Image (cartoon, rainbow, N blue to C red):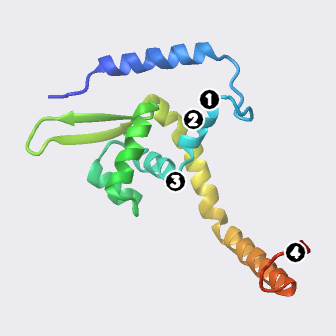
């Protein structure tokens, strides 16, 4: 027995269609553009990891939490609710004891999985270089602060 029906999906599709018709020219560089909040949700701390975990198919909450690693149940729940609200995942509850709840990427969620996979590959491929750059930056700035005195303030 599925608790959530296609009616809620159709309502979400209609709302997305109306929203995209309301603003034709989205520009994430514009401070007033609502696409900024979309971008913020998509690149928050946990959404890319959840998308990566769900890219291979639906998962139960516990399996998803295990795959993501390091996320608390509360934060994962908040992330999934936000993603569901944004139309990126569906939550399907089926009867039984205990009830089974599965999370799955929607068609819209699937469209973001490849860009996130590319970002993930970039991060993994370049982590060593980024960490080396951080170390060099920190050492250079620490030396600069030492030469300026304990307070770290330059000629104020």
131 or 74: nearer the viewer = 74
Do the residues bearing badges 2 and 1 touch, measured as CB atoms within 8 Å?
yes
Circle nearer the N terminus (4, 2): 2
- Residue 23: image location, x then y, percent: 64, 17
Q: Earlier in the sequence, mark 3 or mark 1?
A: 1
Counting from the top left corner in percent of width and height, residue 111 is at: 53, 34
Residue located farthest toward the front when viewing the structure as drawn: 156
- Is the C-beta separation of discs 3 and 4 under 8 Å? no
- Residue at (74%, 77%) from the top-left corner? 138
| Residue at x-position 58% and y-position 18% | 20
* Pair 4/2: label in front: 4
Side of 154 relative to 51 (left or right): right
| Viewer-nearest residue: 125 or 1 | 1
N-terminal of the pair, mark 3 or mark 4, is 3
Q: Which label was assigned to residue 139?
A: none
Q: Residue tagged by mark 1?
A: 34
* Inter-mark Cα distance, 2 to 1: 7 Å
Disc assigned to residue 38: 2
Secondary structure found at label 2: helix
Q: Secondary structure at mark 3?
A: loop
Q: Nearer the viewer, residue 100 or 117?
A: 100
**Answer yes or no: do the residues labelled 4 and 2 have beta carbons within 8 Å?**
no
Q: Position of residue 114 (x, y in %)?
A: 55, 42
- Write down the residue under mark 3: 45
Tell which residue pokes out farthest to the right in this image: 155
* Left or right: 8, with 3 as reference point: right
Q: Which residue is mark 4?
A: 154
- Looking at this rendering, what residue extends furthest in the left direction? 97
Q: How many marks?
A: 4
């Amino acid at each position: 027995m599925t608790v959530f029906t296609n009616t809620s999906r159709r309502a979400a599709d209609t709302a997305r269609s109306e929203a995209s018709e309301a603003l034709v020219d989205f520009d994430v560089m514009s401070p007033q553009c609502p696409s900024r909040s979309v971008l913020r949700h998509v690149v928050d701390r946990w959404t890319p990891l959840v998308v990566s975990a769900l890219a291979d198919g639906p998962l139960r909450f516990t399996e998803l939490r295990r795959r993501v690693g390091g996320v608390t149940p509360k934060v994962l729940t908040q992330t999934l609710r936000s993603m569901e609200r944004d139309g990126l995942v569906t939550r399907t509850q089926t009867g039984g004891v205990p009830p089974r709840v599965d999370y799955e990427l929607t068609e819209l969620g699937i469209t973001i999985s490849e860009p996130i996979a590319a970002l993930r590959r970039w991060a993994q491929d370049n982590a060593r270089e980024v960490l080396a750059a951080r170390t060099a930056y920190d050492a250079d700035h620490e030396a600069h602060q030492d030469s300026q005195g304990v307070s770290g303030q330059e000629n104020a």
